Image: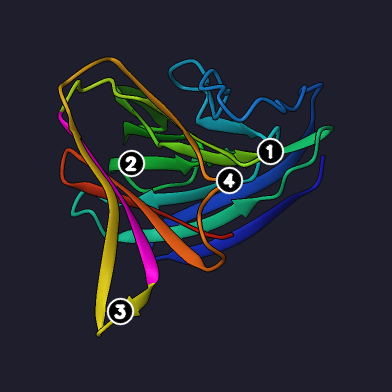
């Protein structure tokens, strides 16, 4: 297996290696059961990222500063393995972002061993259009209030028209389906806000 050094800052060295695996890609846009990362045992010093979907990878130091970033392209037969065996002692966060999910794994490197301290998972809303049906699906694990607005991006008298707005009570699962067949041709923005995070979906009709 060929390895390559990606960056080196002081004593910190992150090694990335390719690996093969049988990963089945999910074609269901509502699916939130997506394998973003596999944890290895304490001391193994490696975290692998399968490539069943496009994944953005970053490594943060204890101060929250990004010290490495990468992108794992979608490829059903390959992935990447990140080796922290030569990282200097300290606490780091390994973060992966896919279309559906964000996983933040905080770990400590000490005496050539890696201890997984915690893993935080949050889900991103999924938007898609099929046969004039606009669907929003969101796994709301924090069960916070959800705010949804649909706006026309063609201003009238310099003002954006709000076509629909909703404030939904906290619930584990949030899903809405809209028939957009009768919308006029133009550009629209669907905005979902929850827990201090805002997600925008732009589409043309």
Q: CA distance from mark 1 to mark 3?
A: 28 Å
**Which of the two residues, 12 or 173, is positioned nearer the viewer here?**
173
Residue at 77%, 34% in the rendered image: 19
Specify the label residue 131 is tagged with.
1
174 sits to left or right of 181: left
Q: Quadrant of the N terminus?
A: top right
Nearest the viewer among 75 and 178 is 178
The stretch in magenta equals 145-153
Say whether residue 83 is left or right of residue 21.
Answer: left
Residue for point 53% across, 23% down: 44
Q: Nearer the viewer, mark 4 or mark 1?
A: 4
Q: Disc 4 vs disc 2: Cβ atoms closer than 8 Å?
A: no
Callout 3 crowding tier (Cα within 10 Å): few <14, some 14–19, many ≥20: few
Q: Position of residue 179 (x, y in %)?
A: 52, 37
Q: Which mark is residue 156?
A: 3
Q: Is residue 152 magenta?
A: yes
The residue labelled by disc 2 is: 93
């Amino acid at each position: 297996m060929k390895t390559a050094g990606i960056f080196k800052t002081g004593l910190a060295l992150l090694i990335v290696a390719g690996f093969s695996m049988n990963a089945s890609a999910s074609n269901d846009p509502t699916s939130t059961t997506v394998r973003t990362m596999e944890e290895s045992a304490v001391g193994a010093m490696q975290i692998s990222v399968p490539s069943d979907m496009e994944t953005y990878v970053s490594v943060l130091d204890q101060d929250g500063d990004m010290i490495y970033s990468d992108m794992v392209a979608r490829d059903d037969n390959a992935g990447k393995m990140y080796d922290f065996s030569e990282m200097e002692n300290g606490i780091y966060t390994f973060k992966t972002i896919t279309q559906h999910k964000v996983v933040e794994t905080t770990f400590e490197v000490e005496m050539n061993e890696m201890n997984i301290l915690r893993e935080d998972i949050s889900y991103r809303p999924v938007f898609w259009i099929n046969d004039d049906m606009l669907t929003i699906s969101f796994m709301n694990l924090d069960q916070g209030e959800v705010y949804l607005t649909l706006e026309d991006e063609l201003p009238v008298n310099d003002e954006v028209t709000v076509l629909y707005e909703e404030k939904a009570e906290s619930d584990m699962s949030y899903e809405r389906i809209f028939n957009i067949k009768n919308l006029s041709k133009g550009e629209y923005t669907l905005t979902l806000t929850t827990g201090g995070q805002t997600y925008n979906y732009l589409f043309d009709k």
